[in-house]
Amino acid sequence: MVELLAARGTALSAAEIAQSLALSRSTVGAILSTLDRHGWVRRHTDLTYQLGPGLARVGLLAPAAVTESEAIGAELEQLATRVGCGAALTALSGDDLVFVTVVGGHGLIPAGIENGTRIPLLPPAGATLIAHAPVATQNSWLDRGDPARRTEFREVLATIRTTGCCAWSLRPGALTALRVLADVVDLLSGRPAADELRGRVLSLLGDITGSAHTEADLNSSASLSLGYLSAPVLAADGRALFEVQIGPLRTEVTAEARRRYIDELLATARRVERIAADDQ
């Protein structure tokens, strides 16, 4: 809504906003009331809305945020180049996993996944973030997953805390499924009314992964399939601020190549940690 008001540059009614964003009037009214209360929008006597003075402080803080974002984006671009596949930075937002920064390369990023894309936080999504969350948050995450895999996912969280990363195998036929999901997401892109369905489709991305590799798997000399790898970006108090992901999507990865993926991933996560710490 803020972006819409900024782009139009003129006052809009709740009905006009609802129509432009394909949202219900009740939803728009509730959000506008909150924005008005915080000064992010200003309500006129004719019941139209414009951007409010509360955004001024956000504007003053924006340059630092942009600088941090550019620095992190550069790190991800370099990571994607070094490992030869897509990379992303994700974070938790309520019950969603949000793609904060997405960079190209083959794999990982189907059409339609871009900066700001949200997917439901269902196991295994967000595992490296959840591994460093409070126990109550971990249990809530586990409750959303397949009960038959609860023990497996709990062990995954423990492995992440030990190794500092997580690597998932590929299910048989995963690459074909990914291409189909990418086509569906692409068809739904740009249709606000289909956002809920798009989110449900994106949540299926977790289904292309098989089991998480154990520490013994990762240290073995055998070739393994690798779907996604992720590592947390930690704050000084041990919380996971972000999750760095790469997606080789390869059915055969040698021990040497696997170690290179992990080393590059962990090194990037540590550099992003320093950028985030400097900003604080």
Image: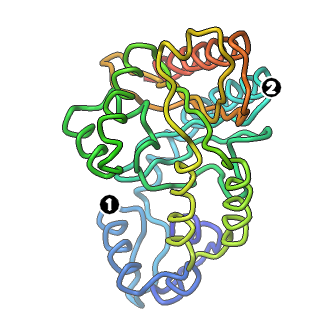
Residue 42 screen position, x and y as percent: 41, 72
Residue 115 screen position, x and y as percent: 62, 49
> Which residue bears the numbered disc 1?
38
Residue drawn at x 26%, y 49% as measured from the top left: 143
Q: Quadrant of residue 10?
A: bottom right
Name the kind of residue labelled 1 in the image: His
Q: How is the image coloured?
A: rainbow
Total numbered circles: 2
Dot 1 alpha-carbon crowd within 10 angstroms: few under 14, some 14 to 19, many 20 or more: some
Query: Which quadrant is home to the C terminus?
Result: top left
N-terminal label among 1 and 2: 1
Q: Quadrant of residue 101?
A: top right
Residue drawn at x 49%, y 73% as measured from the top left: 50
Residue 167 screen position, x and y as percent: 55, 27
> Which residue bears the numbered disc 2?
81
Quick check: 152 above or below 25? above
